[in-house]
Image (cartoon, rainbow, N blue to C red):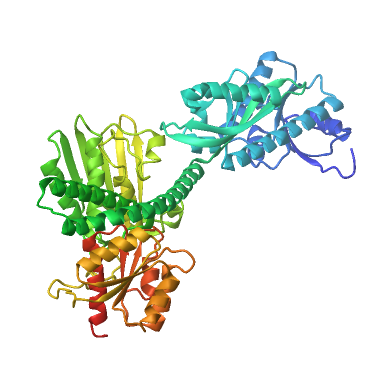
Amino acid sequence: MTAATTPLDVLLVEDDEDDYVITRALLDKAQTIECDLDWVTTYEEGRDAILTDAYDACLVDYRLGSGSGLDLLEEVNARGGVDAPIILLTGQGDLEVDLSAMAAGAADYLSKDEIDAPLLERSIRYAVERKHAEQRIREQAQLLDEARDAILAYDLDGEIVYWNKGAERLTGWSEDEILGERTHSCLYDPDQEDKLQQCHETMMEEGEWVGELRMRTAADEERVVESRWTLVRDTAGGAKQGLVINTDITERKRLESQFLRSQRMESIGRLVGGIAHDLGNLLMPITLGVKVLRRRLNTSDEKTERTLSMIQQSASRGADMVEQVLAFARGVEGERVALDLGAIVAEVENITDETFPDDVGVEVHVPEDLRPVVGDATQIQQVLMNLCVNARDAMPDGGTLTIEARTVTFSPAEAERNIDAEPGDYVQVRVQDTGTGMPDEVADKIFEPFFSTKEEGEGTGLGLSTAYSIVKSHDGFIDVESEEGVGTVFRVHLPVAEEDEASEAPDRPTDAAPMETRGGECVLVVDDEEFIRETAQQTLENEGYTVGTAASASEALEWVEARDGAVDAVITDLRMPEMDGLALIRALHAQYPAVPIVAVSGLADGRTEEAMNAGAHTFLAKPITAEKLQEALREALHSADSPAA
């Protein structure tokens, strides 16, 4: 015993003064502990003193007059127990009493006939140390329970022997429900049996395994966890238990999947945008040339007319497909006005009632107080119709199509769970079917252009990609959940309209003032593709324009300067080598601000607004038909003739 040892507060409950004196004398001889001894003589005094929980250890005589020491121990436990260890003392050893005392929670049981100073000292010291160790274990267990990770241990037979609160929160299984159960049978997907066996073997051989696993909750939901398995050994170095720490990464994996899909969609958009530009250039001579050929050839010949019509129809279908691809790649423009989504859903319901088979039931749920959104009614209807048609096709044997709209609010925390969402109010439109459903790898790709699950010839694979682009251009987002054999649900989220947002469509030119040409206007066509220049020139000359051409921006500037700006309109491609169309528009607008300019592009790079800001009067997306080219030129000439505001 050292001077620095903190004295232990010890209580003695003993009705015999001689035994008290003996006990104090024995404690005075202690070598490793120092004790301050308090003495009470009755059952009641002993009970009240013990319940104060002010002592490090309690020595209780078995015989106390009104009640036994065992009765006292049981009463203290019934009242909630105390931290101090209780050691029972008796005049003679009795195995039955000994066993009863241990069962009731006594720290030790000593016979007075056998007690000496070392025995009493050792009994008190071990009891106190054991209590302190148990307290530390409880504190450590509480810390483990506070951990967000799921921590569990299982024995070498696979039965769970430890289960913290984090594991309970993650899985929904309580400690009472899970202890003694086998880990593989209740916590993990059955199809992971081989992987779990590899985890266990690696842990046994190398001492540790780290990787990802799929867990099942009590509600049969799947959670993805980052799992660390560690082999726990006994004092002899033998394998004793497996310790598992599981970190829930379900949300992180979902966000990673969203991010990767967003990146993939962006890359695909750039790729198909470039392809669409080239296809648009190839289709332009065909769409423009058909009208030129009709003028030059004898179209009264039935075969000639049929051939030209076939060419025109094929080119038009190709142009429509290119337009859809470009809509996916560069977004969809349109009017933005306050919309009643309930009215749009009602229109969609009418169409489905009239056109869908009788074995497809349609249920619609839209609250009367649904808040408005800002958007293009035609485009939103296109999105919903596309989703409904896909739902119909997914139910070849009939089923139920449900369309439900409601207002939802995304908190900052909820918005973080979806990379396309911002905090705020949205109108959610849910389109759900009871059809065949899709596996995860298919659902992850359905918004990609040209991806389709339908038979060849039954779809272009552009419907959902166009819907995705429309929703995104409305500052919204769309997601999908599907389960094979159960069905699919699409959720479209559109931001609600603010109170001060305009509810009327922007002003547009009306049909009351047709834009006619004056006849003989001089037009310059600028494009680095020769066949585009030639077909555009022939098309416009057939309409009475005087047409010049230039193969580059520098050549166009020289052409205009040589005529001292005497040109009525310029039509220029935006994508050209060296000096591009935007630079040409800026230069022309700076020198000749009165000359109207038509910007033309087939690229999905969102340069429409940039071209208009540079000085263009209107924008035309490739591929273009003769009618679209003439209409755009008339609009540009009309805007130049209109008096300044």
Point out the image quarter for the N terminus: top right
Query: Which image quadrant for residue 231?
Result: top right
Q: Where is residue 474 in the image (x, y as percent from the top left)?
A: 33, 59
Point out the image quarter for the C terminus: bottom left
Direction from residue 295 to residue 430 in the image, left or right:
right
Q: Position of residue 54 (x, y in %)?
A: 69, 43
Direction from residue 254 to residue 377 in the image, left or right:
left
Reply above or below: 349 against 192.
Answer: below
Q: Nearer the viewer, residue 506 or 567?
A: 567
- Tag count: 0
Q: Nearer the viewer, residue 95 or 567?
A: 567
Reply above or below: 622 against 194.
Answer: below
Q: Which of 501 and 262 is in front in this view?
A: 262
Direction from residue 286 to residue 251 in the image, left or right:
right
Q: Which residue is drawn at 23% across and 36% down?
A: 393
Q: Residue at x 28, y 52 (%)?
A: 319
- Asked whether residue 102 appears in the rendered view, the answer is yes
- Asked whether residue 181 appears in the rendered view, the answer is no
Query: Which image quadrant for residue 332?
Result: bottom left
Q: Where is residue 598 in the image (x, y as percent from the top left)?
A: 32, 70
Reply above or below: 490 against 377.
Answer: above
Reply above or below: 215 against 258.
Answer: above
Q: Position of residue 299 (x, y in %)?
A: 12, 53
Q: Nearer the viewer, residue 3 or 245?
A: 245
Farthest top residue in view? 95
Direction from residue 324 to residue 516 in the image, left or right:
left
